[in-house]
């Protein structure tokens, strides 16, 4: 029997069958977006005072496991390069920014020299101004040209909200420059009647990779004058382009460079990133061009108080198999957010899921209604999937200060330049240290002190981190992982490129070494046809529709209120099995709905308003087969392997859980088709002799393997830029391909995302942390903080905690001291 754990996000990939320490990376700058109102910092309580109020009482104070004080830092000024136009410098000064920080001036210098550059400094360190100074100077120069359109620039953001916010910032900053700078947003929300104006007259176009992929590149003849004059391409928040999404964006950028060359331009890339390891290497892999990195953050910051918070055990409740459970991070965050709003502390609570953001908003409003009936309206949720007008209204309310508290997904982490926040609540470790500091840095953005609180979820990684603060505060952030050569990513982009312009031999190096292998396969599939002029797209449909660069694929499933026909929002087709199956609870704008019917063929989920006292969680089963073992190394008689696998998954049921406590109320069966995935995995085997030495008998073998698998999935985000929802696992007491007890951990995306490969190359450290996390947990036989998983298709049965510790200890005793070579 195989025991499996599928990542929530990994459902996206299945198709139906038929070096600086992090304590230096949270700058709180005293520069802010042009035109932003700043609150009076002197009237605000200090971060220590706010934390003290939150932790009053014996039950509250015990929940803080560690407090880190990050001292304030002085800024270091410079002067703008003399090639920046004087009127642009004057416009910047009129916005209240007298002198640039050293890293801003250095970035502008490289841009003016025609060198692509990545600025990898902390949140609110003024990265936007670092690239805006040379961009505005180029646009004003172009406006003075006697003939032609003049220089153009392209800005790419991972979210629509960030592009809209940046347009406001550019418009305000460039106001003294008159009509020389004409910024415009071009995305799915841009009205049709405005799009022609943007194409013909805008010289600073703000968009996202999705619109570049689907709307701009396929229509390049209509954008020819813009592309011909393209001077700079700004890529904001480039650290978010990781895994499969990052690999897709890398190929979109190569298509952009190819078309620019066709029209005679060679744009310089200006990238902005949160603090990351080896940002130049990651930026170069993303863009395909050499990139210079700037990592010395010269901006000032206020004091930051960072608390690690562990919700209490609920002694009166028991979870699956009688395991102890903690109060949910969602409920704990809602209480803290309510307390902060009552104090008048402006706060954003970051949540990992859309459902979590909605739940925290609803619970917080209920708590506040008991205190003051005027307060609930000052709290809201913000997430992807809202309709455009809903997003814009929330953004305006946040900017104006009408909202005191917001429960938000990463749509806000990357979306809006927020000034004047006092505190940030982080509901569960966000998956990477880079994201953790990005979220924490949203507080204190006017230079004042700030409070950040990480509230641990009941899972192995969060529990490990709140009791091992050195893993957060004494370790560098991760390197960004992406693989542009993934054939599942590259193939549809070769088709899209061929539709834009026939592919030639000269293009092969641009798209990477896998291209030569893929072209014959695309010819055989009758997607491309080779002629004397190169490879041509053969179909009538648009090649850009072959792939969703966010990795989901398929048509979005529309969520429709059955009684009225009103469209509430959408969900990715690939996530529909787990999120809008029949009986699922769906939240939208604080209202609760029950899914009545999921029509997979019609891409629609019909829902009705309801008020159930529970949430739902899908359960699934998974099997795995080895397609190819690419690399393997001996660990004594054990083997550590990396290669290609095929995974078959089926959602089979869902659990109903109490909203606040998480207590399981029942399980209901589902009848949904299975889905398959070809991806990459790391796996390890053990021999019978090793099992004997570890005192693992056949009765506990399955539970020991299963427990080690769950915990290793939970710990991998410490070693790769993923979270546990990007990866899945299977453990088998006797696997038919290896003929040995085997544990697999695989990427939840077609062709892989680089996470399993990173696990292979860090296996000793990764599995050591896994063993230590299990051993350190205070429970007797296993709980969600160490070896249980809420997504386990086998209902967390069997699990054997002590067996997993002995098994991993035995395995690690024979592991080589040197790690296998790191991937290029």
Image: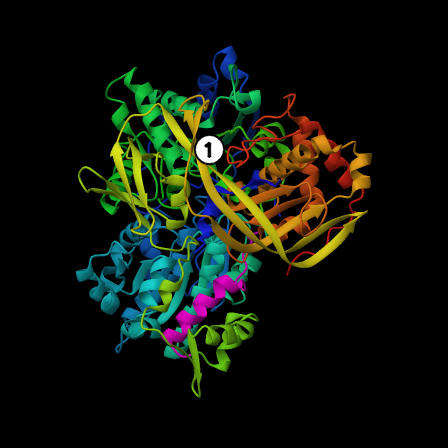
Would you say residue 421 is visible in this rendering? no
Q: Position of residue 94 (x, y in %)?
A: 30, 50
Residue at image point 60% right, 36% down: 710
The magenta stretch spans which residues?
A: 479-502
Left or right position of 172 against 279:
left
Task: Using the image, determine if residue 461 lies above or below residue 434.
Answer: above
Left or right position of 185 against 658:
left
Foreground pick, 223 / 462: 462
- Which residue is tagged 1? 426
Q: Is residue 500 magenta?
A: yes
Q: Position of residue 172 (x, y in %)?
A: 27, 51
Residue at image point 56% right, 73% down: 517
Task: Using the image, determine if residue 557 lies above or below residue 326.
Answer: below
Left or right position of 699 against 258:
right
Q: Position of residue 457 (x, y in %)?
A: 51, 29
Q: Residue furthest top?
A: 58
Crowding at dot 1, Cα within 10 Å, few <14 / some 14-19 / many 20+, comes out as many
Q: Name the image quarter holding the N terminus.
A: top right
Q: Please identify the quarter of the rendering in which residue 227 is found.
A: bottom left
Foreground pick, 433 / 681: 681
Q: Name the image quarter holding the C terminus.
A: bottom right
Task: Using the image, determine if residue 435 lies above or below residue 243.
Answer: above
Left or right position of 258 against 562:
right
Q: Position of residue 791 (x, y in %)?
A: 51, 36
């Amino acid at each position: 029997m195989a025991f499996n754990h599928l990542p929530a996000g990994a459902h996206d990939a299945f198709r139906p069958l038929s070096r600086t320490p992090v304590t230096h990376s949270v700058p709180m700058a005293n520069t802010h977006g042009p035109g932003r109102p700043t609150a009076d910092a002197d009237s605000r309580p200090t971060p220590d005072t706010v934390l003290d109020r939150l932790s009053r009482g014996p039950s509250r104070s015990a929940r803080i496991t560690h407090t880190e004080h990050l001292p304030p830092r002085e800024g270091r000024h410079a002067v703008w390069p003399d090639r920046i136009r004087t009127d642009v410098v004057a416009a910047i000064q009129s916005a209240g920014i007298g002198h640039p920080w050293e890293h801003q001036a250095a970035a502008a210098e490289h841009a003016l020299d025609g060198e692509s550059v990545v600025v990898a400094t902390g949140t609110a360190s003024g990265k936007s101004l670092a690239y805006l100074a040379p961009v505005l100077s180029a646009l004003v120069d172009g406006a003075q040209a006697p003939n032609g359109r003049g220089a153009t620039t392209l800005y790419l953001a991972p979210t629509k909200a960030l592009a809209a916010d940046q347009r406001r910032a550019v418009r305000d900053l460039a106001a003294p420059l008159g009509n020389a700078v004409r910024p415009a947003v071009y995305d799915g929300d841009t009205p049709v009647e405005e799009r022609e104006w943007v194409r013909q007259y805008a010289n600073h176009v703000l968009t996202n990779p999705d619109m570049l992929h689907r709307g701009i590149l396929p229509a390049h003849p209509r954008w020819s004058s813009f592309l011909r004059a393209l001077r700079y391409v700004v890529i904001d928040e480039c650290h978010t382009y990781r895994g499969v999404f990052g690999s897709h964006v890398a190929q979109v950028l190569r298509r952009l460079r190819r078309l620019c060359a066709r029209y005679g331009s060679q744009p310089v890339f200006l990238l902005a990133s949160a603090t990351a390891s080896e940002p130049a290497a990651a930026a170069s892999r993303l863009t395909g061009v050499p990139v210079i990195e700037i990592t010395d953050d010269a901006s000032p910051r206020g004091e930051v108080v960072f608390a690690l918070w562990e919700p209490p055990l609920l002694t009166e409740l028991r979870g699956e198999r009688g395991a102890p459970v903690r109060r949910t991070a969602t409920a704990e965050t809602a209480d803290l957010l309510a307390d902060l709003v009552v104090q008048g502390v402006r706060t954003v609570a970051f949540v990992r899921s859309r459902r979590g953001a909605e739940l925290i908003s609803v619970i917080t409003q209920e708590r506040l209604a008991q205190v003051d009936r005027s307060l609930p309206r000052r709290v809201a949720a913000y997430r992807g999937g809202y309709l455009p007008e809903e997003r814009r209204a929330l953004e305006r309310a946040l900017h104006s200060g009408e909202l005191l508290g917001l429960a938000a997904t990463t749509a806000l982490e990357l979306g809006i330049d927020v000034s004047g926040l006092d505190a940030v609540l982080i509901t569960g470790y966000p998956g990477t240290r880079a994201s953790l500091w990005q979220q924490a840095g949203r507080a204190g953005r006017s230079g004042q002190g700030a409070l950040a609180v990480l509230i641990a979820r009941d899972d192995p990684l969060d529990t490990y981190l709140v009791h091992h603060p050195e893993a957060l505060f004494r370790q560098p952030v991760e390197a960004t992982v992406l693989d542009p050569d993934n054939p599942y990513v590259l193939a549809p982009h070769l088709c899209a490129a061929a539709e834009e312009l026939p592919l030639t031999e000269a293009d092969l190096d641009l798209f990477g070494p896998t291209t030569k292998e893929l072209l014959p396969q695309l010819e055989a599939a009758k997607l491309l046809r080779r002629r004397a002029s190169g490879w041509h797209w053969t179909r009538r449909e648009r090649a850009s529709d072959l792939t969703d660069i966010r990795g989901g694929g398929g048509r979005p499933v529309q969520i429709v209120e059955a009684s009225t026909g009103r469209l509430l929002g959408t969900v990715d087709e690939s996530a529909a099995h787990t999120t809008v199956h029949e009986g699922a609870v769906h939240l939208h704008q604080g209202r609760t709905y029950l899914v009545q019917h999921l029509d997979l063929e019609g891409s629609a989920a019909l829902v009705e308003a309801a008020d159930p006292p529970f949430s739902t969680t899908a359960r699934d089963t998974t099997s795995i087969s080895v397609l190819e073992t690419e690399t393997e190394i001996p660990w004594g008689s054990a083997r550590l392997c990396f290669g290609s696998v095929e995974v078959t998954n089926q959602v089979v049921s869902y659990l109903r859980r109490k909203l606040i406590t998480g207590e399981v109320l029942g399980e209901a069966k589902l009848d949904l088709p299975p889905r398959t995935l070809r991806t990459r995995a790391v796996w390890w085997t053990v021999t019978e002799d090793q099992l004997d030495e570890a005192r693992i008998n056949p009765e506990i073998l399955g539970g020991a393997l299963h427990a080690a698998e769950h915990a290793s999935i939970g710990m991998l985000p410490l070693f790769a830029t993923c979270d546990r929802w990007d990866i899945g696992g299977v453990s088998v007491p006797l696997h038919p391909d290896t003929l040995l007890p085997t544990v697999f951990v695989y990427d939840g995306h077609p062709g892989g995302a680089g996470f399993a490969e990173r696990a292979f190359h860090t296996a000793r450290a990764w599995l050591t942390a896994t063993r230590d996390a299990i051993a350190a947990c205070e429970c007797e036989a296993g709980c969600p903080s160490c070896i249980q998983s809420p997504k386990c298709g086998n209902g967390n049965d069997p699990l054997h905690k002590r067996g997993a510790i002995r098994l991993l200890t035995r395995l690690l005793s024979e592991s080589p001291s040197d790690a296998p070579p790191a991937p290029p």
